[in-house]
Image: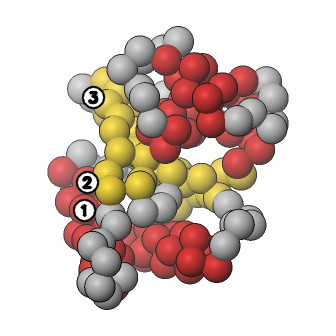
């Protein structure tokens, strides 16, 4: 079991970022939308994410950071957004002496549902077995990743 002084954040990166945290207060989760209005440069999405992440890492005194590592995307915009968020995540973690750990999508799905090809509704239903208030697939993914991290963090 994980030591109580550890604080873990798990992230499902994207314009709608799912997050889950374990610390001395227990487990909490949610999702944040970093999309910008039409006509606003997308750099503001990245800047908003960077400020939000820095605040979360500092506020919750995070010692371990896990994120869902995606190796392919359906479109180029999604790939660019993911790459920017991943780089920002790694940078903010490293600045604080935290080693970021990416865990593959299939690993998370298999951990959560025993099916490495689980769809979004399956992932949400599996998360709701532990926390009925989870309704978004992004939050569900982060929640499962957190549970995985808790079992695999020294």
According to the picture, the residue beneath numbered tag 3 turns out to be 24
According to the picture, the residue beneath numbered tag 2 turns out to be 56
Q: Which tag is nearer the camera, tag 3 or tag 1?
A: 1
Mark with earlier residue (3, 2): 3
Residue 6 rendering spot, x and y as whole percentages: 38, 38
Element marked by disc 1: helix
| For the residues bearing labels 1 and 2, Cβ distance under 8 angstroms | yes
Q: CA distance from mark 3 to mark 2?
A: 15 Å
Indicate left or right for 11 with 73 as reference: left
Above or below: residue 49 compared with residue 4: below
Residue 102 rendering spot, x and y as whole percentages: 62, 57
Q: CA distance from mark 1 to mark 2?
A: 6 Å
In which image quadrant can residue 3 be found?
top left
Indicate left or right for 55 with 130 as reference: left
Element marked by disc 2: helix
Q: Which tag is nearer the camera, tag 3 or tag 2?
A: 2
């Amino acid at each position: 079991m994980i030591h109580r002084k550890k604080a873990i954040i798990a992230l499902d990166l994207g314009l709608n970022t799912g997050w889950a945290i374990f610390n001395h207060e227990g487990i909490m989760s949610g999702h944040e939308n970093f999309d910008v209005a039409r006509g606003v440069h997308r750099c503001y999405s990245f800047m908003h994410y960077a400020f939000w992440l820095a605040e979360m890492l500092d506020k919750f005194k995070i010692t371990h950071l896990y994120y869902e590592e995606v190796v392919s995307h359906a479109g180029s915009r999604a790939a660019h957004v993911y790459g920017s968020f991943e780089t920002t995540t790694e940078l903010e973690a490293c600045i604080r002496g935290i080693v970021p750990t990416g865990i593959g999508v299939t690993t998370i799905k298999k951990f959560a549902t025993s099916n490495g090809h689980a769809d979004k509704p399956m992932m949400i239903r599996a998360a709701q077995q532990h926390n009925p208030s989870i309704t978004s697939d992004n939050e569900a993914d982060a929640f499962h990743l957190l549970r995985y991290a808790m079992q695999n963090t020294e």
